[in-house]
Image (spheres, rainbow, N blue to C red):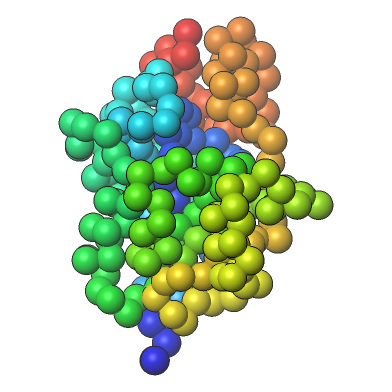
Amino acid sequence: MPDSRVVGVFGGTFDPMHLAHLRIVKALRDELGLVRADDEIRIIPTGLPPHRQLAMASNEDRRQMCLLTMDGEPGLVLDDRELKRARFCYTVETLAELRAEVGKETPLVFLLGGDSLTHFHTWHDWRHILDLAHLAVAARPGADLAHGLHPAVAQLLTENAEKPSRPRLSHGKIYVLSTPPEDISATDLRMRLKNGASTEGLLAEPVRRFILDNRLYQ
């Protein structure tokens, strides 16, 4: 198969998007070599997440905070399709849409945190996700990624795990990123903002100003 462009996908509530989110995305870009001019990573703010409470900030505010956080980073593209849905948003449906758009052979990589694997088996039609895309898992340093996994998910990991490299197949592999996520909780971040505590190193400065100017999380 000729070398194809690669499309990464990173979804989340992003309430707000913070610098740890950005560092994970940059790890995906760097470790999988998504540096060609036609490569891209779609940042997809969730509209109505089935597993989480509703976001505190509005869809438009979250969209703007994502754009401000992403600004100047090559290869990152905001995809707001889920914000336009007036129903629950399921990862498998979004990936199916993206697969139809990019074609059958283009590698598609869905990025998620290691903690998400522990409840991956509860996601809607989760078994179909690896039929559509690869997984890239950002694990904590020294973590036993298989610990606490549902047996079927643990088996998927055992059978399909690969060291990070530029994908050539379109789907089906699980890449474990060596650059881990940082312990920044959006809940803790919102509490800091509410109490006027420092958010230095946690938020992009334009996002911090946007939050203060619009009195978000007060």
Residue nearest the viewer, comparing 159 with 65: 159
Residue 7 spot, x, y in % from top left: 39, 66
Q: Residue at horizontal 59%, vertical 70%?
A: 159
Examine the image and state in which quarter residue 76 appears: bottom left
**Looking at the picture, how far across and down is residue 165, in whole percent?**
59, 75
**Rendered position, 104 above or below 207:** below
Quarter-wise, where is residue 77 in the image?
bottom left
Q: How far from the left and from the top, in percent, is residue 22?
A: 55, 47
Give 134 or 29, whichever is nearer the viewer: 134
- In this rendering, the count of numbered labels is 0
Residue nearest the viewer, comparing 124 with 89: 124
Specify whether residue 200 is in view.
yes
- Residue placed at 51% from the left, 70% from the top? 173
Q: Residue furthest bottom?
A: 1
Q: Quadrant of the N terminus?
A: bottom left
User: Left or right of 133: which side holds 84?
Assistant: left
Quarter location, residue 8: bottom left
Judge by depth and name the residue closer to the eye, 211 or 164: 164
Say which residue appears at 27% left-offset and 51% top-offset: 93
User: Compared with residue 65, is residue 152 higher up or lower down, i.e. above or below?
Assistant: below
Q: Picture coordinates of residue 158 (x, y %)?
A: 63, 66
Q: Is residue 168 left or right of residue 46?
A: right
Q: Is residue 25 visible?
A: no
Q: Is residue 177 left or right of residue 116?
A: right
Q: Residue furthest front?
A: 151
